[in-house]
Every structure is written in structure tokens, then in C-alpha cells.
Image: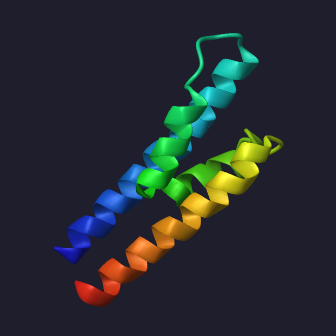
């Protein structure tokens, strides 16, 4: 069960990473964008690692104050939940 949870966690973070990349691409090409709310919800819903990495690699939302504060907060919350799961299930 723990192995399955870690696989799901990794896949979800790949999705959140790709969302940051897709939104950056859309921003550069004047296309319909992914809302900031969606990006933040996916980050707090255990996608903090992917969101932070996507922001850094794609240089996306790195200047916005809201994202400077909330993405690291999401990452910390995600790591706390993951630590709890690993300690109590693993």
C-alpha cells in the first residue's frame, strides 16, 4: 500500500509540474491560461514538489508575491503530510 501511495504522489507531482509548464507556454503564446487558483489548489493537494520545481525550471510565477509565499507553504504542508504517512503507515 505504501508503494502505491508513493507512486500516486510521484505521478501527481509530475502533473503539477506539467501544469506550470503548460501555463508558461500559454502565457508566452497568448492563449487561454490555467487559473492561479487551480495552480495553487493542485500545489496544496500534495503537488507542492512539482509546483515548486515547475516554477523554478520554467521560470513561471516566480516574481508573484502570492506564489513566492504559497508555493513553499504548500511544499511544507505536503512534506508534513508525507512524513506523517510514512511514519504511521510505513
Residue 62 in the figure: left or right of residue 81: right
Identify the residue shown where x is 32% and y is 68%. 6
Residue 28 in the image: state x and y as whole percent. 75, 20
Q: Which corner quadrant of the image does residue 39 belong to?
A: top right
Identify the residue shown where x is 71% and y is 55%. 69
Q: Determine whether 27 is above or below 51 in the image.
A: above
Residue 38 in the image: state x and y as whole percent. 50, 34
Residue 87 in the figure: left or right of residue 16: left
Q: Which corner quadrant holds the C terminus?
A: bottom left
Comparing 87 with 66, the one in front is: 66
Residue 40 in the image: state x and y as whole percent. 55, 43
Q: Which corner quadrant of the image does residue 37 belong to?
A: top right
Q: Determine whether 2 is above or below 23 in the image.
A: below
Residue 5 in the image: state x and y as whole percent. 26, 67
The image's colouring method is rainbow
Q: Is residue 61 visible?
A: yes
Q: Which corner quadrant holds the N terminus?
A: bottom left
Q: Is residue 90 visible?
A: no
Q: Determine whether 71 is above or below 39 in the image.
A: below
Amino acid at each position: 500500500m505504501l508503494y502505491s501511495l508513493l507512486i500516486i504522489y510521484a505521478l501527481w507531482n509530475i502533473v503539477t509540474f506539467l501544469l506550470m509548464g503548460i501555463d508558461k507556454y500559454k502565457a508566452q503564446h497568448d492563449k487561454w491560461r490555467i487559473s492561479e487558483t487551480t495552480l495553487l489548489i493542485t500545489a496544496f493537494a500534495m503537488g507542492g514538489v512539482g509546483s515548486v520545481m515547475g516554477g523554478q525550471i520554467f521560470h513561471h510565477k516566480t516574481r508573484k508575491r502570492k506564489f513566492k509565499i504559497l508555493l513553499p507553504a504548500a511544499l511544507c504542508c505536503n512534506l508534513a503530510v508525507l512524513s506523517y504517512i510514512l511514519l504511521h503507515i510505513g
